[in-house]
Amino acid sequence: MTKPEDVLTKGLKIKELKKKLQYGDFVLLGDVLGCSRDAAVKRFQRGNEIAIEAMEKIVKNREELKETYKSEDT
């Protein structure tokens, strides 16, 4: 059983991640999870730990990749 603070933490993570989502992120999440885009969206919205963790990595890796190429450009 999840503790109330765990649910709160998940809710905050989801809220912060939603601000950073871009077109195609759920398609990639679906590929990673081995399910459809729609199923990936539902898993993420319902607070599935694996879906949230994978989405965090997708967003983080995209931001790191952008920074890498921005710094090489200058």
Image: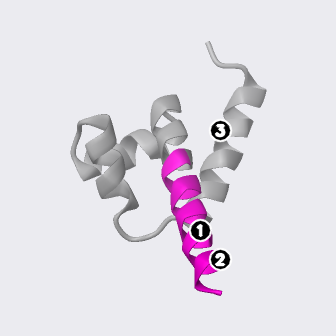
Question: Which mark is first along the chain, 2 or 3?
Answer: 3
Q: Residue at x 51, y 62 (%)?
A: 62
Q: Which residues are magenta?
A: 57-74
Residue 7 image position (x, y, % from top left): 67, 32
Asked if the stretch drawn in magenta spans residue 55, the answer is: no
Q: CB atoms at circles 1 and 2 under 8 Å apart?
A: yes
Residues 40 and 53: in front is 53
Q: In the rendering, which numbered label is found on residue 71?
A: 2
Q: CA distance from mark 1 to mark 3?
A: 29 Å
Residue 31, x across and y down, in percent: 26, 45
Kindly identify the amino acid type of the residue bearing the numbered disc 1: Thr
Residue wearing tag 1: 68
Q: Is residue 60 magenta?
A: yes
Q: Residues within 10 Å of mark 2 (few under 14, many from 20)?
A: few
**Colouring style:** one colour
Amino acid type of the residue tagged 2 in the rendering: Ser
CA gap between label 3 and label 2 equals 33 Å
Q: Indicate the quadrant containing the N terminus: top left, top right, bottom left or bottom right.
A: top right
Residue found at x 37% / y 44%: 42
User: Front-most of 40 and 34?
Assistant: 34
Query: Of helix, strand and loop, which one carries label 3?
Result: helix
Q: Residues within 10 Å of mark 3 (few under 14, many from 20)?
A: some
